Image (cartoon, rainbow, N blue to C red):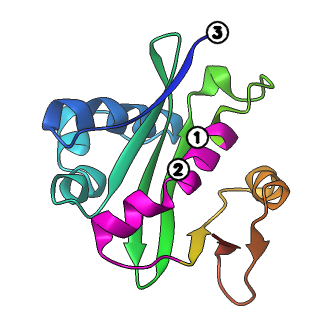
Amino acid sequence: MNIEIKRIEPTIENLYEIELLRHQVFHLKTDDNSIRLSYSIFHALHNRLIPFALYLNGDMAAGVYVSCYGNDLFIDHLFVKEEYQNTGLKLGRRLLNTVLELKPIFEKHFGKEISLSRLTPNNDKSRSIYEKIGYERQSNTPYMIKHI
């Protein structure tokens, strides 16, 4: 099993592939216009979102978009292809941990010192996974936070 995590260069072609996967995982419209005109592609093209993909044996199996507001690193979307969910491979966890290790790259890109990572769990299962890797619930918000 070969796992590779790469930053996606912000070209329409590259972003289309990762955005198509996100739309499929979250059961969103997958027509060409919905993908090409998405918030994620627009902001990635303008360097406000940084996309990463995890490849399993050359197949894009997971993705994540990262942004920065204030001194917080936001995990805007984290998604794993359905066929790789609940397999024990922990692809989402691997991808998230790798992204968090890249804090100096994000600080340079966004020109800010980053102290927290924030994300919003999609469900109780994802909340439990995030807790296992050090995220804590933040009262009165939908966010979970982790000091990095």
Mark 1 residue crowding within 10 angstroms, few (<14) / some (14–19) / many (20+):
many
Q: Residue at x 26, y 64 (%)?
A: 48
Q: Residue 24's x, y, as percent? A: 45, 32
Q: Are marks 1 and 2 in contact (CB under 8 Å)?
A: yes
Query: What type is the residue that disc 3 sits on?
Result: Met
Query: What type is the residue that disc 2 sits on?
Result: Val
Assign a secondary structure to mark 1. helix
Q: Nearer the viewer, residue 18 or 47?
A: 47
Tell me if 102 is positioned left or right of 20 in this view.
right
Name the residue tied to disc 2. 99
Magenta stretch in the rendered image: 93-114
Q: Residue at x 30, y 75 (%)?
A: 111
Tell me if 146 is positioned left or right of 117 in this view.
right
| Label disc, if present, on residue 1 of the rendered structure | 3
Q: Is residue 49 above or below residue 116?
A: above
Residue at far bottom of view? 140
> Marks 1 and 2, how far apart in space?
6 Å
Assign a secondary structure to mark 3. loop
Question: In the figure, residue 34 lies in which quadrant?
Answer: top left
| Label disc, if present, on residue 95 of the rendered structure | 1
Q: Is residue 128 above or below residue 10?
A: below
Query: What type is the residue that disc 1 sits on?
Result: Leu
> Marks 3 and 2, how far apart in space?
21 Å
